Image (spheres, rainbow, N blue to C red):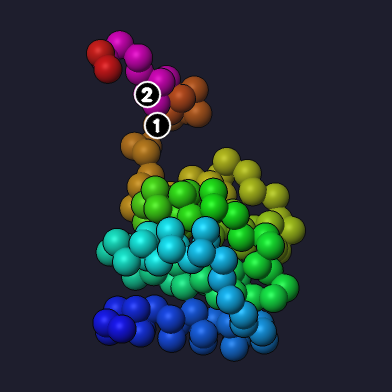
């Protein structure tokens, strides 16, 4: 096994141990696409999400909750989307209301804030400029 997969599986095992998960076999329909997606990942934070997904897929408690669509979603996720996803998940876990201001603060914290405008209406107009051809 190459060093990437050894490290990746070690991370998944550490996540499982941290959460007291009993590990078992992962169905091939989940395992092979998951390993393929993880092997193509270049972002360290997304690597951790792949490892967490593997830990959950191998868990006797959570395995049935891991769906092929999660793998497809994670394959397409960019680092800013990962940060937004984690902020939403944390907000839900904390049972906070995740309003527009919180959303904009998350984007600003990861360097993806829109230009400052005087009003929300101006921001909305700037974001919906359909005059440019596709």
The answer to whether residue 11 is visible is: yes
Q: Label 2, on which residue?
A: 126
Q: Where's the N terminus, which quadrant?
A: bottom left
Could one spot residue 110 in this view of the protein? no
Where residue 115 sits: x, y (%)?
Answer: 34, 37
Q: On the image, numbered disc 1 is attached to which residue?
A: 117
Q: Is residue 109 above or below residue 117?
A: below
Estimate the x, y position of residue 30 in percent, counting from the top left: 52, 61
Q: Residue at x 57, y 66 (%)?
A: 27
Q: CA distance from mark 2 to mark 1?
A: 9 Å
Please determine whether, in this image, residue 72 is positioned above or below residue 4.
Answer: above
Looking at the image, which residue is at 35% across and 47% down?
112
Looking at the rendered structure, the secondary structure element under dot 1 is loop
Residues marked 2 and 1 touching at CB (< 8 Å): yes
Quadrant (top left/top right/bottom left/bottom right) for the C terminus: top left
Density class for disc 2 (Cα within 10 Å; few <14, some 14-19, many ≥20) is few
Q: How many marks?
A: 2
Q: Is residue 26 magenta?
A: no
Q: Position of residue 63 (x, y in %)?
A: 65, 67
* Labels 2 and 1: the sequence-earlier one: 1
**In the image as oriented, which residue stretches furthest toward the front?**
28
- The secondary structure that dominates the magenta segment is loop
Q: Is residue 89 above or below residue 7?
A: above
Query: Is 128 part of what is drawn in magenta?
Result: yes
Q: Residues within 10 Å of mark 1 (few under 14, many from 20)?
A: few
Q: Disc 2 on helix, strand or loop?
A: helix
Where does the magenta region start and end?
125-132
Q: Is residue 101 left or right of residue 38?
A: right
Left or right of residue 16: residue 134: left
Which residue is at the front of the view, 103 or 92? 92
Q: Residue at x 37, y 39 (%)?
A: 114
- Quarter holding residue 7: bottom left
């Amino acid at each position: 096994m190459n060093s990437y997969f050894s490290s990746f599986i070690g991370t998944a095992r550490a996540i499982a141990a941290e959460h007291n998960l009993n590990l078992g076999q992962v169905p091939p329909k989940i395992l092979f696409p998951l390993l393929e997606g993880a092997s193509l990942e270049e972002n360290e934070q997304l690597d951790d999400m792949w490892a967490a997904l593997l830990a959950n897929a191998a868990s006797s408690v959570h395995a049935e909750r891991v769906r092929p669509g999660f793998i497809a979603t994670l394959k397409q996720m960019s680092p800013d989307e990962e940060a937004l996803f984690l902020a939403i998940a944390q907000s839900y876990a904390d049972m906070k209301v995740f309003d527009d201001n919180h959303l904009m603060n998350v984007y600003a914290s990861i360097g993806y804030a829109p230009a400052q405008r005087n009003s929300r209406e101006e921001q909305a107009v700037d974001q919906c400029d359909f005059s440019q051809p596709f």
